[in-house]
Amino acid sequence: MTQTRFIVVTGGVLSGLGKGITTSSIGRLLKASGLSVTAVKIDPYVNCDAGTMNPFEHGEVFVLEDGGEVDLDLGNYERFLDTNIPKDNNLTTGKVYRSVIEKERQGEYLGKTVQIVPHVTEEIRERVEEAAAKANADVCLVEVGGTVGDMESMPFLEGLRQLSREHGRDNVVFVHTTLVPILAPVGEQKTKPTQHSVKELKATGIEPDMIVCRCEEPLAESTREKISHFCDVDTDAVVGAPDVDTKYQVPLLIHDQGVDDWLEERLDLDRDEPDLDPWKRFLDGVQNPTHDVEIAIVGKYTELEDAYMSITEAFNHAGSELSTDVGIRWVDSDELTLEDLEEADDPDGILVPGGFGARGTQGKINAIRHAREEKIPFLGICYGFQLAVVEFARNVLGLEDATSKELMEERGIDSENPVIDLLPEQRSVDAKGGTMRLGATPVRIDAGTTAHELYGTELVLERHRHRYEVNPRYHDDLIDHGLTFSGCDSTGLRMEILEHEDHPFFLGSQFHPEFKSRPGDPAPLFRGLVQATLKADDGV
Ligand code: GLN
């Protein structure tokens, strides 16, 4: 049995300090040192998972290989650690209470008064331990969402305090992330917010071992010493996290401050010097591109970039490999007309992402038509794939009322041609949480197609999150009119990838390729889109 070490990351002062990136970066350094690393995200909200939450409030819902619908930070862990994370690694208040209440109903606590301490807190500790054990992890990172002092995070902090007692203080490190503001007229780095937030943390019984300070500028030596002195941590364990151009610099930035050396000593880790070369190569591709292109993302959550985080990440991965800066033009699909599209300068490529519901669909269909007719490289994902079928049915097959059942149901409209229909197994499903077709399933790709050229193989596993699909009734008609379905599921009945032959690059996928894209290993369909925009730029 591995003696797992735990690194718990909390946040103070305010939210949005980049706790997720700190956690992921520490993980990257330790993984690059040859250790087996996993990461757990705690989200203190009451939802059982992120699947029912609006991306506009919380950013994208990330989908895992096992079908878990989770917080976007788990996407960062997967990308930085280059590993698949299971859904049990996302703990929420809802998940924890649900299981405690179920156990109570089963009589597992018979005779006892079930209480937050110790029953809920023990459930939390056990779930963290189980996640570490399942991954056979040398190191398990645990990020606590929210800010220390929030009422809803209290049971989690208590559970983690108990974890450190149980495993011994030598095997657990608490990292606290804070903000060090600079007061404008004086230009001085202020430590008081950090001191207060550490006080708040200590009130929960947790003593921080390391403090990561977000600051506009590198931490002054005097600031470091002051924080060390007032907060009772080693000077070496006060780490500066100044603003950087890209979050991919953070692993190197904290390595340069000796974070991994300090952790090695403190946790008695048996590890090698980290091999950071692959990461440096990736970073170099991001920072020193020799080409640039602009791709329009046409969606309805364009005001919050986090709502499409994995998509912009996938562009960064593809861009780094192709030495290309992929600029994003955010286009709100609400009320986007064909005239708007014709009047604007064409972007080098267009991507229509996943989505739900009627709002903004006509705008997306207009963008797809524009991409098809003007031969602009195009990628449609999930809803974008489905709407590419609707557009083709309307404008090429001449089925003017072609639509998706999703819209018919929501808007109460009639149509003779539901070219996108509910998946048969969804017909009996009423509940909304965790009930879609979710997670990775095999996709068969036909040889001789663009998709095959990009993937270089005939069988891939890709992640899904949908209730609707291409209506099998229309397969033949669509194919007869020139649409190619180059990928399908293992039964051959469910369409997974579409493409047009007489177009430089027009592809759609029922699955979400963005969730499996990684630094140094970009999603093939994103690589294909960026490559196509480069070719179009060169006039090839
Ligand atoms: N709303 C569509 C469906 O449920 C597409 C979902 C998505 O884009 N993730 O099938």
Image (cartoon, grey):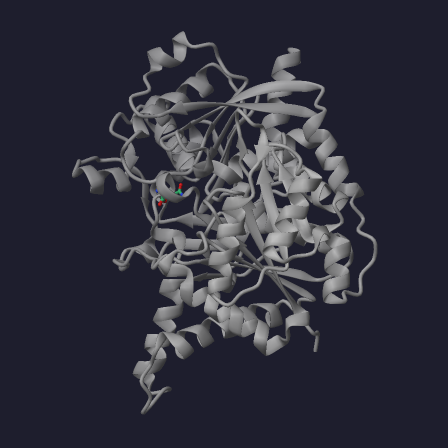
Residue 295 picture location, percent across and down: 52, 22
Question: Is residue 197 rendered to the left or right of residue 471?
Answer: right
Q: Is residue 169 left or right of residue 200?
A: right
Q: 220 or 147, which is in the foreground?
A: 220
Report the residue at 47% width, 70% height from top: 124
Describe residue 135's horizontal placement relative to residue 469 as left or right.
right
Up the image or down, 377 lies above or below 478; here it is: above
Closer to the camera, 484 or 43?
43
Figure check: 178 above or below 531: below
Above or below, 178 against 140 in this view is above
Q: Position of residue 425 (x, y in %)?
A: 34, 57
Residue 448: give x, y in percent of width and height.
Answer: 63, 35
Residue furthest to the top in view is 343
Quadrant in which the N terminus appears? bottom right
Describe residue 267's horizontal placement relative to residue 203 as left or right. right
Residue at the limit of the structure toward the bottom, as seen here: 111
Where on the picture, by quarter, is residue 427?
Answer: bottom left
From the image, which quarter does the C terminus lie in?
top right
> As rendered, which of 143 and 232 lies closer to the eye?
232
**Where ligand 1 lies, by quadrant?**
top left
Does any portion of residue 516 appear in the rendered image?
no
- Residue drawn at x 52%, y 43% as measured from the top left: 17
Give coordinates of residue 508: x percent, y percent: 48, 34
Residue at 41 percent of width and 67 percent of height:
155
